[in-house]
Amino acid sequence: MFARLRAGMPAAEAVARIVTEAARADPAARLNLLVCGGSEIVATAWGDTLFTHVHEGVLLASEPLDGRPGWRAVDDRTLVVASPDGVSVTRI
């Protein structure tokens, strides 16, 4: 991971590649990863739960932290990128 980031690969691309490579090696793997750097957070949901909550910022958690409305489950095999520009969710 760090070598890819040092080489200039965007964090989202590096995380997606690592997860797909690891899943090829072990199809039953649970590969939720979280990478923070600067003003961006990149996370994956792969074989385990991940939730987002967007309100005055972004929360990412393995399960809802409280009963507030707005928690959204992230689909399996998905990449989440949160930045000051918003949140994007894409299939890996």
Image: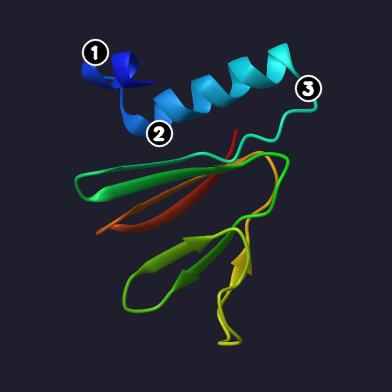
Residue 70 lies, with reference to residue 1, above or below; the image says below
The three-letter code of the residue at mark 3 reads: Pro
The residue at which mark 3 appears reads as 27
Residue 38 lies, with reference to residue 49, above or below; the image says above
Quadrant containing the N terminus in the rendered view: top left
Q: Nearer the viewer, mark 3 or mark 2?
A: 3
Q: Which mark is residue 91?
A: none
Among the 4 quarters of the image, the one containing residue 10: top left
Q: Which mark is residue 7?
A: 1
At numbered mark 1, what does the secondary structure look like: helix, strand or loop? Answer: loop
Q: Residue at x 78, y 22 (%)?
A: 27
The residue at which mark 2 appears reads as 12
> Which badge, 1 or 3, is on the more N-terminal residue?
1
Q: CA distance from mark 3 to mark 2?
A: 21 Å
Q: Residue at x 43, y 66 (%)?
A: 59
Q: CA distance from mark 1 to mark 2?
A: 14 Å
The three-letter code of the residue at mark 1 reads: Ala
Q: Are discs 1 and 2 less than 8 Å apart at CB?
A: no
Q: Residues within 10 Å of mark 1 (few under 14, many from 20)?
A: few
At numbered mark 2, what does the secondary structure look like: helix, strand or loop? Answer: helix
Is 8 situated left or right of 43 in this image?
A: left
> Which badge, 1 or 2, is on the more N-terminal residue?
1
Q: Of all residues shown, which one is farthest toward the left? A: 38
Q: CA distance from mark 1 to mark 3?
A: 28 Å
